[in-house]
Every structure is written in structure tokens, then in C-alpha cells.
Amino acid sequence: MDIKEAVKEKYGQAATRQASCCDPITSNLYSSDQTTELPEEAVQASLGCGNPTALAKLQPGEIVLDLGSGGGIDVLLSAKRVAPGGKAYGLDMTDEMLALGRENQRKAGVTNVEFLKGEIENIPLPDNSVDVVISNCVINLSADKQQVLREAFRVLKPGGRFAVSDVVVRGSVPDEVKRSMELWIGCIAGALKDSEYISKLAKAGFDTIDIEPTRVYSIADARQFLAGQGMDVDAIAPQIENKFISAFIRAVKPSGGKACCGPACCS
Ligand SMILES: C[S@@+](CC[C@H](N)C(=O)[O-])C[C@H]1O[C@@H](n2cnc3c(N)ncnc32)[C@H](O)[C@@H]1O
């Protein structure tokens, strides 16, 4: 089975179950101010690893696109922030997740939302049509991350913001250990190193790139899982400690103004 089919199967099943209360990655990401404004089911369906809407500084009138919107928690929060006049799109490739997102939208009574079926590697929106691209723990699932970043750049308006939560690796980790930690975190296609994320964003055309850690995973969090994988946890602990993080990744699509070359073109 290829990566995309494995991801669809996993999240198709996840859409019909509730998130675990005690998962160190997906739990306690949202403030009570945020969760009380949403239906309980939308909060329970959260499978992200951060809270991009809290950090993206959304404004009324803006158009937001959530890559891999799942049960829709970030789409619904964004839609409320950009009202009046704005709109939030949720893009997902898994039918069960789209159905869950639409059901949560209905329960929330939010109308400035549209869920789109499609892949984040091939976004079904025109060039220069979105003010802010958000995403919550989805880009690490893609086997072609450069293509995702190219597509995010294409759909953003000049000056538009990329504001994403994702799992990132800091520094070097031996391959076998990296793979086991990724299995624990759920990064099916592998997490990028922070330096790779920055260079791929720059290659896509972004500037003002910044990676801010929001949660650091400790060996204690992963101990039970790694021991179950046959790993000598005490021996590998120093190679893991503080290296796997959830991060808020920001970048801007340049507004395309002419560089100043003299009095004529600066006027
Ligand atoms: C970890 S869940 C996160 C869901 C949501 N962002 C949240 O915070 O609850 C990943 C979601 O991304 C979707 N997804 C994964 N890879 C995708 C791709 N290549 N194109 C579109 N959707 C994708 C899955 O169907 C799933 O709903």
C-alpha cells in the first residue's frame, strides 16, 4: 500500500473514533476560551499537534485555507476569527474526515466555511486566492513535502502568510531511532529536519521563515511505545531527548514589490 492509501485508511478509521484524552501529542492544545465556542464533537475530533489559529493572527475579511482539515476544529475557529466578510476552507482527501468536518460545521452553526475534497499536493483553488494557509500536523504525512509547499505558495496572495503546526526534528538522529519515534508520533512519511523545512520553504519562494517550538517530546513520553518496539530505551535516550518537537512554522509569500533601483521606479 502506498503512503497516501495508508494515511487515508488510518484517518478514515480515526474519523469514526474519538481522540484519546491523554495522548501527549494531541491533547491540551486549545484554550478553554476556544473549546467552549465549539461543539464537543469538534474538539474531540482534534488530531493535530499544535494550535495554528492561536498563532496566525487572523483578521476579519481574510480567506483561510486549512491543509488536511480533519474533523474541522481549526477551520471552525478560523471561520469565527475572519467573520464578518472572511471565509475558511478545509481541504482533506479522506471522505470520512470530510463528512465529520461537515457534521461539526452543522453543529457549530458556522456558515462561512467550505470543505473541499482534494490533496494538499494539488490544491483545488486558484493562484493568489488565499490570505493565510494553516495546517495542523499534516505536512509531515506527505511523501512530497516540496510539492505541498509549492502549492501553498501558489494559492497564497502576494504578502500571504503560511502559519502551520507540524512535527520537526532538531539535529541528527540515527535512522532506526528516527523511524521508531516517527511511528510513535504518527508521522507516516517522516518528519523534516528544521534546516530542511527552512530550505524547502525558501526553495518554494517564501521569505521571513521562522520555526518556533511549541512542545518538546521527552523520552519519558515515548518510553512505553519504544520499549514495545524492542528498543533499549535507556541506551537511545540521549539520541532522542529534546530532538522531536511540535513547532509553529511561519513564512510569508513576498508581496512582489519592485526593488528600489532609482528615483523613477521608487515613485
Ligand atoms: C493528523 S490529522 C489532522 C487533522 C486536523 N488538522 C486536526 O488538527 O485535527 C491528518 C488529516 O490530514 C488528512 N491528510 C493527510 N494527508 C493528506 C493529503 N496528502 N491530502 C489531503 N489530506 C490529507 C487526513 O485525511 C487527516 O484528516
Image: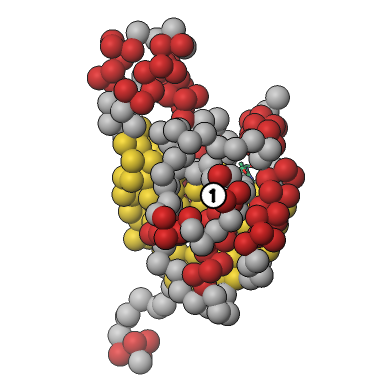
Amino acid, disc 1: Val
Q: Nearer the viewer, residue 18 or 209?
A: 18
Q: Position of residue 165 (x, y in %)?
A: 44, 48
On whether ligand 1 comes within 8 Å of the CB at mark 1, the answer is no
Q: Position of residue 74 (x, y in %)?
A: 53, 56
**Along the horizontal axis of the image, is 239 left or right of 32?**
left
Label 1 packing within 10 angstroms: few (<14), some (14-19), many (20+): many
* Quarter holding ligand 1: top right
Q: Vertically, is 70 above or below 61?
A: above
- Residue at point 30%, 90% (across, down): 263
Image-quadrant location for residue 58: bottom left
Image quarter where the N terminus lies is top right
Q: Position of residue 157 (x, y in %)?
A: 53, 70
- Residue at point 55%, 79% (across, down): 84
> Which residue does the numbered mark 1 point to in the structure image?
43
**Along the horizontal axis of the image, is 260 left or right of 125?**
left
